[in-house]
Image (cartoon, helix red, strand yellow):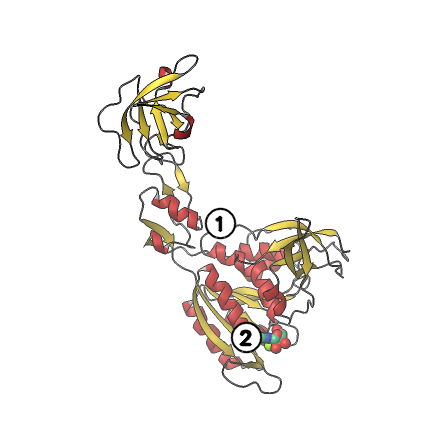
Amino acid sequence: MTIKTLPELANIHNACDDYDPNSMPVEQAREYIKAFLAPVKETEKIGLMSALGRVLAEAIIAPHNVPNHDNSAMDGYGFNADDLAAEGTTLLKVTGTAFAGNPLSGEFVRGACIRIMTGAALPADVDTVIAQERVKIDGDSIEIAEPIKRGANVRYAGEDLAQGQIVLPVGHLIKPADLGLIASLGVGEIAVYRKLRVSFFSTGDELASIGSPLKTGQVYDSNRYTIFGMLTRLGAEIQDLGAIPDDPALLEKTLQQAAETSDVIITSGGVSVGEADFMKQLLQKLGQVLFWKIAMKPGRPLAFGKIGQAHYFGLPGNPVAVMVTFYQFVRQSLFILMGQPSPAALPMLNAVCVSPIRKLKGRTEFQRGILFLSDSGDWQVKTTGNQSSGVLSSMSQGNCFIVLDDDVGNVEAGTRVQVQLFDGVI
Ligand code: AMP
Ligand code: MG
């Protein structure tokens, strides 16, 4: 695939040699989307405790070493390795104590040792620590009967983070470990990109809202709830615009309102064949939107584009297709829009599939699977059963997608397959 410059979505036909909206491989759709994303630029300073899931707008540089002093890795005794006898047992007098946060008072005098606790700073001239259980106490002295290397059980200043080093780069997504790491530098406030503003709504005349009884032919609007859940985990600032009937005037009003206040608009329904023309006209009037048929199952129809400055994702209506297209296209895009230049993909691994799977070549399938620890102690995967794109219980029961690429046909039980984890991650 070649993408030349893409200033306008309207030019995609000219700019991409192999652009075919009616049969687009999954990877190609990802690349096209990526080429049109304009990440958030505005930044803000926030307290560390509010920073989980946010993206760094300024690198974290270590203002000092971590640890700040050479210190003991053990509860034991500290001494200078030159004071050990060349052979046999060494007797060292214990002349003081160093605690974590309470260093040795006075100077350490060579030829002796000190009692030293884990994390306590090493006084000058102490370069080695022996664990307390490795020595024999003899009055106010200790006996060391084993050889011990200089520097044993010592944690050196700067061995975790060195002063001046880039600890975390711009574009890094803050995880729990990072909160601790930044705290270890004594930094309490950091610069992050502002939160991504995402509006979403469902479309369809058949949608009923929770609280009103179902009339014949109606379904409760479940997509808004799954989308809400996935966006919440991503840490977006979300705006729920409800369920909108297939009414051009109402849809137009809702889309325009969303475009004014959002970085991203996500809709479900209305982009499949039959409905596409209707939404297509509206979306083309309001912005630049491309309609694709992706070579994938579930989730064939997908619309992507811009309405004003807002990025637009038109997901299919089927409840499983909504989640699959969100995980395969929207998740990565939102991470990029949040300021991460190359977000980590969902974890992908290999496992033996114990279920036979019928599969047509020429499209990528995302079957819902359950990755489980077998009795023999290895991880295996089975399908959740009915793979219809309306069967949302498959996403609820499943913890992974069994990803079957375009060139894969039927899968026999016992074959290794690719497994993409979605449970607990977003
Ligand atoms: P559509 O893409 O609009 O043709 O919808 C495809 C299928 O998904 C239809 O069976 C719809 O009833 C169903 N569907 C669409 N939107 C929702 C929704 N928000 N919640 C549950 N099912 C939906
Ligand atoms: Mg519909």
Tell whether 91 sits left or right of 344: left
Is 242 placed above or below 44 here?
A: below
Label 1 vs label 2, nearer the camera:
1
User: What type is the residue that disc 2 sits on?
Assistant: Leu
Give the quadrant of residue 113: top left
| Pointer 1 residue | 341
In the rendering, which numbered label is found on residue 72? Answer: none
Instruction: Indicate the position of residue 47 as horizontal and vertical percent values.
Output: 32, 53
Which residue is painted at 40% across and 39% down in the image?
Answer: 166
Closer to the camera in the image, 329 or 306 = 329
Q: How many angstroms separate mark 1 from mark 2 (CA)?
A: 32 Å
Q: What residue type is labelled 1?
A: Pro
User: Which residue is the site of mark 2?
Assistant: 282
The location of residue 262, given as percent across then percent down, is 43, 66
User: Quick check: which quadrant has ligand 1?
Assistant: bottom right
Residue drawn at (35%, 27%) of the image: 77
Q: Does the residue labelled 2 lie within 8 Å of ligand 2?
A: no
Crowd rating for badge 1 (residues with CA inside 10 Å; few <14, some 14–19, many 20+): few
Q: In this view, does 339 lie to the left or right of 61?
A: right
Residue 336 at x, y percent in the picture:
49, 54
Tell me: residue 356, above or below residue 143.
below
Say if 303 sits above or below 55 in the image: below
Q: In this view, does 31 lie to the left or right of 101?
A: right
- As helix, strand or loop, the secondary structure at mark 2 comes to helix
Q: Can residue 330 be seen in this view?
A: yes
Q: Which residue lies furthest to the front in this view?
A: 139
x 58%, y 51%: residue? 347
